[in-house]
Image (cartoon, coloured by chain):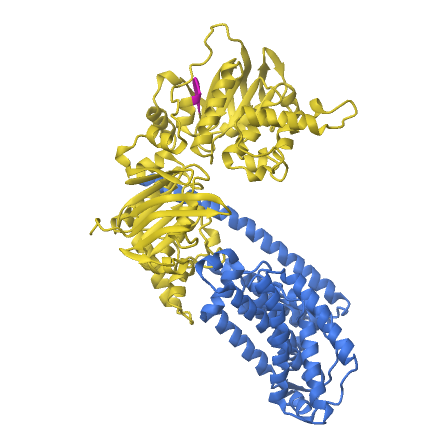
Amino acid sequence: MKKILAKNEFYLFTILFVICMTIGGMNSVFFSLGNMVDLLRTAIPYGIFAIGIMIVIVSGGIDISFPAIATLSTYVTLLVFTNGNNEGNLLLFFLISCLIGMLLGLVNGFFIALFDFPPLIVTLATQSIYYGIQYTFFGSKRLTFLPEYINAFSKAGLFTVVDENGMSYIFPVYFLILAFVLLLAFLVLRYTFAGRGIFAIGGSKSSAVRVGFNVKLLQFLVYGASGTIAALGGAVYTIMIRQGNPASLIGLEMTIISIVVLGGIDINGGKGSIFGLILGLAFFTVINNSLILVGISSYWKTLVLGIAMYLYAAVIAYKGKIRDKQVHEIDGQDLQKKGRKC
Amino acid sequence: MNTDSSFIKLTNIGKSFAGVVALKGIDLEIRPGKIYCLMGENGCGKSTLIKIISGVYAPDQGKIELDGKLVKHMTPKEAIKNGIEVIYQDFSVFPNLTVAENISVNTEITQKRKAVNWKRIYRQAQLALDKLGITLPLDETVERLSVANRQLIAISRAIAHDARLLIMDEPTTALTKREVDALFAVVKRLNASGISIIFVSHKLDEVMQLSQEIVIMRNGEKVADGSISDFTKEDIIYHMTGRRLDSTSYGGPQSAGAKTTLEVKHITQKGGFTDVSFGIKECEIVGITGLLGSGRTALANALFGIHKIDSGEILLEGKKVKLGSVRSAVSNGIAYVPEDRLTEGLFLSQPIGKNIAVTVLDKISNRIGMLKASSIKALALQWIETLHIKTSSDELLAHSLSGGNQQKVVIAKWLAIEPKVLILNGPTVGVDIGAKTDIIEMVKSLARQGMSIILVSDDVSEIMMCCNRILLMRSGRITEEILTDHITEPELYAKIRAQEV
């Protein structure tokens, strides 16, 4: 029980539960199957982006450039496929997009791992460069005539819910992409040595070097993965809104970082879990989409999110204080025990 | 066990950095199952030698043999593969990971594991802890453990895969006395199972207590080695510093008419100390000792005006004074060398000269408050000379100095105000033996010239060597006053330890 109380996830879960109960109690539509499907659907692109950023933050870094990577990689891929009308196929669309994303991410990794440049500055710079390339060479025109297979995939559903008013809610197939990436990230972080290495670097880089982790390679790969996942998120988002819009992701980086931090992932690196990330995502999605259900204007949602972030920071800081106290107590007990032996 | 054949043999090892010789002609043999102590002042080449043994540096000349076989190119990986492990001062642990992961990580890396099997990690960790005979919570994150326990984790990690030599670089610096005892028990247990240990330390008592063999270095050369039983404390200090230590105690004021400079009557500070009364005369060195938390530092802080007293009175040369602030203490001729010189006593990123001059800025500035660089320099050079501060220039930054020399700078800046009462709090903590000798000599000669000195310390030998009178503190009260001539070092040590139970 003590262990559960010690986890950030526990507090977030409790708060989330209370909020859901309150909203659901005031408006039963919240718990309707249709609303649930809707919430899950909107969470998909945010979730995918957040996984990439979580991995970077756990390794002790940060990546501000991912919306630019997502935009540039999907836009270029769309251009290639829409030029000759309906070329390629869905798999190729994802593959090429992710490949471009990976390369752009590896550029970040190259400067951060090899030259030890600060991640914040490197990714701020590349964000600017990638957006610059987008607007200078490819323009800012929206692409609305997408290949047919993209439109088809956008509408494909695992199942459809029809409520009493006759409204139908499609649960999209591309939800599986989010589920797959979540599972993959969980397995890599928990059950591969490279994954533990990412945590180790985030905890103490100098120790990781001394113990013998290949720190530079791991960092390089982390930013490569972040770029790949960003491109995947960009591709899914494009499918969702059925257009290539070079301006739609601008400013998303702070939102995603908020989700990751709300999920209990330590902004200083080394700590965090996929379970926490899912809770952070759920919290964000509920606040972002459901306040309207209880009659709170959507202008309020950023305010509510801000207050939630602030309270959360306070809880973490308070827990840190308690922990320091406990460390002293543990030491004290040790001393007493040893004293009795003497 | 065959202790005749050596595990590591170094012959005529030499190493230079940019033309500066760090090591010359070192011969060293490490045999299985022995505890070696490597001693020497700062900059004598100890760390360089350790780095050569652990493969971090390649020697310029000489040869390294492992189990009688010549090693051409020693790398850190090669060293670890051969069971040579170094416990660094920062322990290289991961605060965010669990105890089990921290212990197993080296083994996992050497076995080139790709996947993580949590059962295996816990098993390996438990095995290592069993070898040491200690228990720690395996699933706790390391940041929740004490420094001593983090060190045990570093040791467990080193022995988790067959270590044959454990090198420990000043392992006791951050530990309490009891933790040191616990650490030594672990070290002895490891040693009994055949692991050799190289123990690097400044602390003579610990060295005499733990090691079997001793190697002493000075200026990059090995000056003495052999069985610890062949060495006395005085021998070791002599070999390390090249000087004989004057271990006679300080007699105190020779004339009966010495005036009382500082007297406190029934002073109390809530949470600090209670009903403390004592006086100190010219030429006296009074030691205040006791355990951590006995109120000794609170008392020193109060005498320097850092924290106010709640009741009682303080008399300076017979006149009642109020020490409400540091400024008032300084203007009354009281100087204080604090416990933690790095955070409280020095401006590390400022030059040595300015650090010395900082207490007397108003004296050396002209009428409109401008400072003259030449008077700062003159003052700095004077003190660098008087206190033998080892530096090539007064313009170097304070953090370029060794611990002992930094301490001398702190003392110099307070001597510059020509104090009547000098309070020293742990003046030789973390200072090497040569500088310690210098500081002790300096304290005595200042007292001979008439200064009253209060020495707050838990270093028994330092107290015995310096003071003519000792005040023993316990839970905020002075429990006993002892003349140094009436007590021996072990007796005083026992008195202090007796308070612990």
- Asked if residue B470 is among those painted magenta in the image, a careful observer would answer yes
- Residue B444 position in % (x across, y down): 47, 19
Which of the two residues, B455 or B9, is positioned nearer the viewer here? B9
The C terminus of chain B is located in which quarter?
top left
| Magenta range | B466-472
- Give the number of callouts: 0
- Residue at the top extreme? B257
Q: Is residue B258 visible?
A: yes
Q: Colour of chain A?
A: blue
| In magenta stretch: residue B444 | no
Give the quarter of the image for residue B331. Answer: top right
Q: Which lettered chain is shown in yellow?
A: B
Q: Is residue B210 above or below residue A158?
A: above
Please state if B259 lies on the left or on the right of A80 as rendered: left
**Residue at the spot x=27%, y=48% of the render?**
B31
Which residue does the image show at 31% across and 37% down from the upper left? Answer: B209
* Viewer-proximal residue among A210 and A92: A210
Q: Position of residue B340 (x, y in %)?
A: 53, 35
